[in-house]
Structures are given as structure tokens and as C-alpha cells.
């Protein structure tokens, strides 16, 4: 094994908690709660669906019953009395983590677990300006997570529940919802390994990962070879237990060759792709188990130094994974099927699309918007002027689509659904709106931010025609 | 023929005795009729809500399925909260007299805030009463053996799983403002909820309860 690969695996093992996938951390005498049988008797009648799912589950086979997961202490914020037992409706990662400790620790601090913090600054404008509070409960929070609240009357607040958003803030303070991917109450391994496990949230205009995957060679191979995927396998190591195709879980979480699996779903991502401008990101791991990303433009924090976490509190840095290390981890998955040069060249194609988006559209558009705000051409309120929607969609929807399309090898999403729409928006909506809003100052603003961008120079040669539009040759000659 | 003797009654049934018996009998019947009427009247919604504090309990009741069932079979206050049988009913009303005492000399239960703050204890005490008497007032109308329900298996649940349970073990918060079970109820959360509902500043609930 080359030394740098060995070094990478050591780092990844540390990041993952343990190296090779984990079995539960409690012995069987810790489950099989005596009161659980009574639950099953009644719920088999009153809610036969979930009881039936549980009966088919690995939990049932192992003797893990309702009470093992739903038990609560009287003092718990969301404890209720039900049929004489103290239980909680919400099962949090902390509850699952009693047995699945490794997965819980990996999940803690991940982009999934912090999915509420990730959009905390954006939510008020989305909820209060563009929509209304009803959409927070039924929309935003269903993917990102709600702050679940048990009301004083003993009922869960319908503004916050039902919810299985991936970054749900639970009454016990833990963050996340295992059932977001591991559908209750069957908790099927196969289901969580399916691309379908991610579709509820990773689809639609701003992160069309379902559509991207399905339109890629990976998706094509998966559809054609589903029965060869060993989705029910006890272990699921790419290249060993299956090799027909990757799913979302394969690349972002799965074990591959010597690469350990992880429940930190963003660990192998070098870029942030859902921002106005993409930047490669460090992954900072704190000594309390928390994590956060920091942009590569900052110098990497030293182990032991204190750095603010996403929740505003400070913690000491345990280790830092550089963007390159994160990329190397992802590439190890590729390498189970693809050669080194193939994998690296693919990553180059992907990176070039991100650079193109950043330099041609993301950075200039952001700088132009900043000028419009600082010159008071726009009110500070978001979404009260058409250009604010235009700019938002440019990076949040269309720009994200282009970048995701390139990252997962869907040509259509990289181009026609992605960068083409970015370009169309930029030239046919954004720039005209800038001119409208800025009036006589527009020329100066545009020259300042686009004048030196090589790929916008074609705008300065309007006489240069092309037959592309299908109206003959505008140069006047016959075809 | 014995003087003063009427019909074939024994010697000790004198005229006075007979008069006392007839008077006593009529008075006794009258007393029973009075008790029945008294219990009947004092079990009615009209009587209970003569105290304004009870009007606050009646508001959610009037929205409940026990007030507005599709069948029109309406349960009055006493149908649920006063035991069946005239002696038990009288006793319940006697014991219930303490509520009247508190209404007059206790906290200002007519105030919706004070009322809401004290509601959990009232609910716990009512549930204790239902449990002690095996929900006998529920069973006036609801025959456990005959509960069929609209969903599959409701019958089975009531005949098998609920066999050794009493109605209020499962069915609480049907009529009045919902209160958690005592074991998992949190006074602090309740106080904050009441403060929020009435727009009071944090901590005022504790102050009001201490008054």
C-alpha cells in the first residue's frame, strides 16, 4: 500500500470512529423490554401496518421491541404516559445510538445532522417573505428538520411534527432523524441502500440528484442490474459484495475496498455546491465529536486550537481533513471500478465545470448584486425586487443543478438543465434587470465585474454571427 | 271488641304509632323523591355552570363528542362525574361540596388564567376518581363487551388487550382541555403554555399560583 494511501485510510478510520463498519455496541441482554410484548399485542390490531413492518424487521428477529426504542424517562422533555408506560413518540439518534453508537457518532455534526443550521440564515426570508409559516412545517422542515416540540398538554406540536427531516432537532437535544433514510418500522438495509432512500429530498429544482443519478451511466447500470446489487447483503462493500453499479449510498457513505463506510454523508465531498460561489472545504472535527466545514481560502485550523462551531459555541479542534483528503476518499470508491487516470480525469472535468460556474457567473453575479445593494439600487429586503429571484435561482437552483450534474456525470444536467439555464438566465434576465435597476450606472457596474472576464468578451462583438439560431446565416451568405 | 283497635292490627299499633308510620312513610318517600330530584338537578349542566368557573370547563365540553354525538345522546356533567344510584350520587354531591367551599373561599377560579393554572390537579383528581370506581359512570352507557368501533380490531382490543384496564387508562382528554398524565406532566411547561396563551410575562404563573 502506498504510504499516502495508508495515511489517508488512517485519517478516514479516525473520522469514521471505527474502521470496518460497526455492529451494535450493546449485548442482547440490554434489549427485549418486558413491556414490549403488550405494545405488539394491541398495535397489531390498532396499527397493523407498522406492527407488520416491525415483525418483518431485523429488530424483531433480534428481539428488539417497541419499548427498546420508544422508552423514555419521566423527566424527558417529550415523555408521555401511554398505557401505563413512559414513552416518547419521537425516536432520536440518541435513542438509536444506544445500540448503533458508531453510526450515531459518525452522523453527529455531519451536513445531514446540521441541516437546520445550514439554512438557518435563509429560512426567515423564505418562510416570512416568499411564503408563510405553513410552508416551514410542510416544506423546509420536512427535509431539513423541525425543532420538535411537545406541548404542555402532552401532544406533539403539529407545527413541528410529524417530521423526519434529516437535521431534526429532537426534544433530547440530539440532531437528526435516522428514519429519514431508514424508513420506520422495517429499517431495511436494502431500502436505505436504494437511490430511492434519498429521493424525498434530493430531487427537484435545487438539488436534482435523483434526476442526475438516473440520467447518468451509474443510474443506467443500477436500473439494468438491480438484482445483482446484493442490496440485502449482510455486508455491502463495493467491489466485494457488489460491483454492478453504485447508488447514492455507495459513493457518499459506503464501504469500498479498503475505504470504511461512514454515516457522515458529506465527508467525501471536497466542494460545497449549493452556495452562490463554490469553494473547496476543510472538514474540521472537534474533540467533542462535532464537525464543521471551513473554506479552503482560510488557513486550516491547527489541532488543539479553538474554533466556533455552527451553533456558535467554541470547541477544540481534534483534526482537520483537507479538501484533497476528502476528494481522495471519494476517488477510492471510483477506483473499485475505474482506473486512477480515469477517475482523476473525471474529477478534473467536474472541477472545471465548478470553476466555470464560479468565474463566469457565480462571482460576477455576486459582486454585481453587492454593488446594487451598496449603491442603494435595491432595498435590503430580499425578494421584493424581481432581480432578487433571478439571482437566487441563478445560484441556488440552476447553478446548483449544473454543478451537481457535473459531479455525478449527467451530461443533460451539467448542460441543458444546468449551465445552459445559468447562461440563459444570466444574459437574458439577470443582465437586463441589472441595467433596468442601475440605470445610467449599469454600464460602469457591468464593466467593473464583467470587463475582465474572458468568457464574457463575446458580448463586445455583436457583429459576429452564427447559424445556430436556424434563421440562415446572419452574415448574409447563402448556405 | 277492643276499644281503639282498628282492623286486625296488633295491640302496639296504636293510633299514634299508625299516624307516625304513615307520616314517616310519606316523609320518607318525599325525602327520597327530594334526593332523586336534588341529585338530578345538581347533576345538570345548568346547575354546574351557575359557578362561572365551571363555565370554563363547559366550553370545551360543548365542542366534544359527548355533547355533540351524531346520535344526539348527550351526556350531562353528572352522567360522567356523579356515581349511579341515589345514595352514591348524594354522597358524591356531599363530597363535591368542597368544590363549592373552594369556589367561595379559595383561589379565584372564575379567572380563566387561575382556572387554567389549576386545571391539571383537577384533571388528575378526576382521573383518580374514575380509576377508583372502575370508570363506572362511563359504563353507564358504554358496555365494554359491545364496543365494536368503526375500525377493524376495535372489538378485539376492547375484549382482549383492554380486559384488565379501566376506560380512563386509555381514554383521557376526551371532553375537557387536554392535560398530560400525572407521571409525565410538567408543571413548568404548563405554566409557560398558560402564560403564552394569555400573553403574560414569564414567571407570572408561579406568582399567581403562590397568591
Image (cartoon, coloured by chain):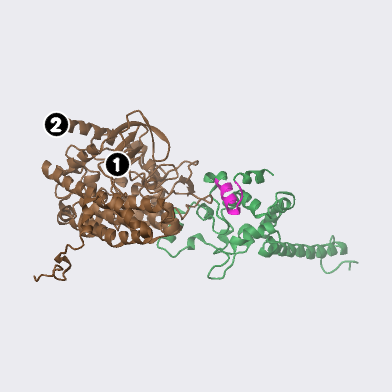
Chain colours: A brown, B green
The span from disc 2 to disc 1 (Cα, nearest Å) is 25 Å
Q: Is residue A281 above or below residue A409?
A: above
* Residue furthest left as drawn: A479
Q: Dominant secondary structure of the magenta stretch? A: helix
Q: Residue at x 38, y 57 (%)?
A: A139
Which quadrant of the figure contains the N terminus of chain A?
top left
- Residue B74 at x, y percent in the picture: 59, 67
Quadrant of the snapshot with the C terminus of chain A: bottom left
Is A431 above or below relative to A90? below
x and y, in percent, of residue A426 in the image? 28, 58
Asked if residue B191 is among those painted magenta in the image, a careful observer would answer yes
Q: Is residue A64 visible?
A: yes
Q: Which residues are magenta?
A: B189-201
Question: In the image, A226: left or right of B155?
Answer: left
Reply yes or no: does residue A254 show up in magenta: no
On screen, residue A171 above or below B13: above
The correct choice, above or below, for A270 with respect to B81 in the image is above
Tell me the tag on residue A264.
1
- Looking at the image, residue B16 sits to the left or right of residue A106; the answer is right
Q: Is B204 placed left or right of A307 in the picture?
A: right
Q: Nearer the viewer, residue B188 or A447?
A: A447
> In the figure, is residue A29 to the left or right of A173?
left
Specify the subunit that label 2 lies on.
A
Q: Give the SS element for disc 1.
A: loop
Residue at 33% x, 44% y: name it. A111
Q: Residues within 10 Å of mark 1 (few under 14, many from 20)?
A: many
Q: Position of residue A273 (x, y in %)?
A: 28, 48
Q: Nearer the viewer, residue A378 or A322?
A: A378
Tell me, for residue A2, which label it has, or none: 2
In this view, the residue in front, B190 or B138, is B190
Secondary element type, mark 2:
loop
The reply to whether callout 2 and callout 1 are in contact (CB within 8 Å) is no
Amino acid at each position: 500500500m502506498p504510504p499516502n494511501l495508508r495515511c489517508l485510510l488512517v485519517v478516514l478510520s479516525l473520522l469514521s470512529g471505527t474502521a470496518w463498519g460497526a455492529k451494535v455496541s450493546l449485548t442482547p441482554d440490554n434489549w427485549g423490554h418486558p413491556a414490549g410484548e403488550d405494545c405488539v399485542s394491541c398495535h397489531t390490531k390498532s396499527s397493523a401496518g407498522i406492527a407488520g413492518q416491525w415483525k418483518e424487521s431485523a429488530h424483531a428477529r433480534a428481539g428488539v421491541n417497541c419499548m427498546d426504542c420508544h422508552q423514555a424517562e419521566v423527566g424527558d422533555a417529550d415523555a408521555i404516559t401511554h398505557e401505563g408506560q413512559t414513552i416518547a413518540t419521537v425516536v432520536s439518534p440518541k435513542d438509536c445510538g444506544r445500540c448503533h453508537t458508531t453510526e450515531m457518532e459518525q452522523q453527529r455534526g455531519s451536513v445531514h445532522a446540521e441541516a437546520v443550521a445550514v439554512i438557518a440564515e435563509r429560512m426567515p426570508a423564505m418562510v416570512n417573505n416568499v411564503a408563510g409559516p405553513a410552508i416551514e412545517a410542510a416544506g423546509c422542515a420536512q427535509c431539513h428538520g423541525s425543532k420538535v416540540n411537545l406541548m404542555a398538554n402532552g401532544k406533539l406540536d403539529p407545527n413541528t411534527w410529524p417530521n423526519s427531516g434529516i437535521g431534526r432537532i429532537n426534544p433530547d437535544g440530539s440532531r437528526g432523524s435516522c428514519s429519514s433514510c431508514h424508513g420506520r418500522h422495517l429499517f431495511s438495509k436494502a431500502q436505505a441502500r436504494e437511490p430511492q432512500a434519498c429521493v424525498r429530498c434530493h430531487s427537484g429544482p435545487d438539488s436534482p440528484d435523483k434526476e442526475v443519478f438516473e440520467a447518468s451511466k451509474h443510474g443506467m447500470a443500477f436500473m439494468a442490474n438491480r438484482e445483482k446489487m446484493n442490496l440485502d447483503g449482510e455486508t455491502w462493500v463495493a467491489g466485494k459484495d457488489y460491483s454492478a453499479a453504485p447508488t447514492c449510498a455507495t459513493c457518499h457513505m459506503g464501504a469500498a475496498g479498503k475505504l470504511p463506510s461512514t454515516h457522515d454523508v458529506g465527508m467525501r465531498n471536497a466542494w460545497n455546491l449549493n452556495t452562490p460561489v463554490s469553494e473547496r472545504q476543510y472538514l474540521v472535527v472537534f474533540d467533542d465529536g462535532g464537525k464543521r466545514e471551513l473554506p479552503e481560502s482560510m488557513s486550516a485550523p491547527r489541532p488543539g486550537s479553538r474554533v466556533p462551531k455552527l451553533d456558535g459555541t467554541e470547541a477544540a479542534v481534534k483534526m482537520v481533513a483537507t479538501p484533497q483528503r476528502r476528494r481522495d476518499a471519494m476517488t477510492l470508491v471510483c477506483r473499485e471500478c475505474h482506473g486512477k487516470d480515469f477517475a482523476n480525469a473525471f474529477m478534473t472535468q467536474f472541477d472545471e465545470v465548478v470553476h466555470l460556474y464560479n468565474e463566469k457567473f457565480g462571482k460576477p453575479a455576486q459582486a454585481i448584486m453587492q454593488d446594487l445593494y451598496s449603491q442603494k439600487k435595491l432595498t435590503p429586503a430580499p425578494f421584493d425586487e424581481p432581480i432578487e429571484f433571478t439571482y437566487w435561482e441563478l445560484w441556488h437552483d440552476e447553478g446548483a443543478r449544473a454543478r451537481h450534474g457535473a459531479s455525478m456525470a449527467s451530461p443533460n444536467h451539467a448542460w441543458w438543465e444546468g449551465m445552459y439555464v445559468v447562461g440563459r438566465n444570466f444574459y437574458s434576465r439577470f443582465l437586463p434587470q441589472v441595467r433596468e435597476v442601475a440605470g445610467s450606472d449599469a454600464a460602469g457596474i457591468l464593466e467593473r465585474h464583467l470587463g475582465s472576464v474572458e468568457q464574457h468578451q463575446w458580448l463586445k462583438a455583436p457583429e459576429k454571427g452564427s447559424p445556430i439560431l436556424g434563421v440562415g446565416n446572419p452574415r448574409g451568405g447563402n448556405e | 271488641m277492643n276499644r281503639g283497635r282498628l282492623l286486625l292490627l296488633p295491640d302496639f299499633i296504636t293510633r299514634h304509632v299508625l299516624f307516625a308510620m304513615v307520616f314517616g312513610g310519606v316523609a320518607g318517600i318525599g325525602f327520597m323523591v327530594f334526593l332523586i330530584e336534588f341529585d338530578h338537578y345538581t347533576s345538570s349542566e345548568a346547575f354546574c355552570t351557575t359557578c362561572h368557573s365551571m363555565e370554563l370547563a363547559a366550553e370545551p365540553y360543548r365542542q366534544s363528542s359527548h355533547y355533540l354525538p351524531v346520535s344526539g345522546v348527550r351526556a350531562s356533567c353528572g352522567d360522567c362525574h356523579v356515581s349511579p344510584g341515589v345514595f352514591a350520587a348524594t354522597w358524591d354531591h356531599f363530597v363535591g361540596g368542597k368544590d363549592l367551599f373552594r369556589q367561595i373561599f379559595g383561589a379565584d377560579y372564575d379567572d380563566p388564567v387561575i382556572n387554567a393554572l389549576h386545571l391539571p390537579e383537577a384533571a388528575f383528581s378526576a382521573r383518580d376518581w374514575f380509576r377508583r370506581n372502575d370508570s363506572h359512570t362511563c359504563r353507564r352507557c358504554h358496555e365494554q363487551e359491545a364496543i365494536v368501533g368503526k375500525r377493524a380490531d376495535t372489538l378485539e382490543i376492547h375484549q382482549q388487550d383492554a380486559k384488565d384496564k379501566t376506560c380512563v387508562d386509555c381514554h383521557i382528554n376526551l371532553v375537557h382541555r387536554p392535560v398530560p398524565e400525572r407521571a409525565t406532566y410538567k408543571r413548568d411547561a404548563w405554566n409557560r403554555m398558560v402564560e403564552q396563551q394569555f400573553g403574560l410575562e414569564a414567571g407570572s404563573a408561579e406568582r399567581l399560583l403562590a397568591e
